[in-house]
Image (cartoon, rainbow, N blue to C red):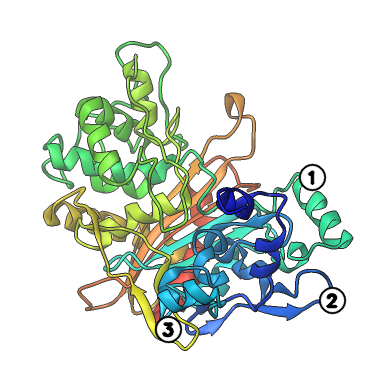
Amino acid sequence: MFVQANHYQNNQANQRNAIQRFNQKRGDILVAGQPVTGSKATSGAYRYQRTYTQGPLYAPVTGYSSQIYGNTLIEGVEDAILNGTDSRLARYPLWNAITRQQVAAGNVKTTIDPKAQQAAFSGLGSARGAVAAIDPSTGAILALASTPSYDPSLIAGSDRAAQQKWTSLNNDPATPMLNRALRQTYPPGSTFKIVTASAALDKGVVTDVNAATTSPNPYTPPDTDHPITNESTQDACTDATLMYALQVSCNTVFAKLGDEVGEQDMVRTAQAYGFDDGGLTIPVGVSKSVFPTGLTSQAFLALSSIGQYDTAATPLQMAMVAAAVANGGTLMKPHLVSELDRSDGTAIERFAPETYSHPIDSTVAGELQDMMVNVVAKGTGTSAQIPGVTVGGKTGTAQNGVDNSGKPYAWFISWARPSGASSSPVAVAVVIEDSNAARADVSGGGLAAPIARSVMQAVLSG
């Protein structure tokens, strides 16, 4: 028994660990200092069961803690803090190790703004979609919403009802347990044109955003006979300036720019914004957003440069793009947890802002800000306008399905700052999967932009 103690202690058949874990109340996950989780006494083998306040609203943040199915998201990553086994929680670690006395569970403070979270969740309503909002200057995540959602309380126990609910959720074709803000990637469509514009300005392919480009309409890449066209039948995109091309979202201009920048520099710029990073954690793991490499055709590069082909992004990734532009070219590492505390509120770890990268310099960032403001002022993003506030944005409607047969994804990315202010306290990305919109770039402006506007207003209102 002594020699094999660790083996027996950690054996899955040994229920003592689980019984001990659920023998005391689990620590709480806090939003703006208030718990959005709790614990309730039960009559079963496990003394306490997890509960959630406004479960569907915060499920994309908290995840779930189940007596049967384990833990996810913050409940999983910070499980040792929340169940009281993290050694840092003990004020007298050696004494606790000798006596095996159970330490009170700790709490996890998040960066979520409750007003922004509610605005994001309410804005999405019954649609399938997601919202991610970031403070550009710190990287603090202000909102993570995903719909449809679910109530983690209903699968927290070990009774038959919890098991039936688990089966029902996993069999639901609407995938309510999928965290679309962090774990689902979509073709970003025209919102990716911000990245392409960044590369074109950074490399010097474009030196004046108000000067005419050399852009045929339609544009046929050199190694194909399939032309790239614009949604509009007007010829205004022919040789359009970069400023106007972003305003009305000319596919032809940005597809040609991607080819002119070249794969190497397009990849470099995309990766500086966070694409192709499979190790991003906030501290919850985030699915890798992709800008394709090793392309065998300029046509594929052109399509990738307008957010199609194999380009794919999470909503958090596109919020990072908007945040970097808003923050003068510096991208801060997104983070969801601000502090880990003991049960008495004393901190055992605080998380300071951390720089992720510098995808563009401040001059290019200023040019992009002007272009995005123009989109909201008189382009496809007018639905995001807020009186007395400077708003920059970019719409997108991404093709979906074979031969574009599915409903398009409606996108909007944006940032906002009070008029006269030097910094933006919020950057947002919104995607709606099941839009019934026409296949025009304005769809993102009509469906997603109003949601982004409400989130930005919530943050600006304090």
On screen, residue 182 versus residue 152, left or right, reads: left
Q: Secondary structure at mark 1?
A: helix
Q: Is residue 5 above or below residue 294?
A: below
> Which dot, 2 or 1, sits closer to the camera?
2
> Which dot, 1 or 3, sits closer to the camera?
1
Read off the residue under disc 1: 171
Q: Is residue 371 above or below residue 220?
A: below
Residue type, mark 2 in image: Ser
| Mark 3, other Cα within 10 Å: few <14 / some 14–19 / many ≥20 | few
Read off the residue under disc 3: 461
Read off the residue under disc 2: 43
- The spot of residue 23 in percent (x, y) is 69, 74
- State the residue in front, 267 or 243: 267
- The spot of residue 139 in percent (x, y) is 32, 64
Q: Is residue 86 above or below residue 330?
A: below
Mark before the other along the chain sequence, 1 or 3: 1
- Give the image quarter of residue 159: bottom right
Q: Secondary structure at mark 3?
A: loop
Mark yes or no: residue 56 visible.
yes
Toward the right, the furthest residue is 160
Mark before the other along the chain sequence, 2 or 1: 2
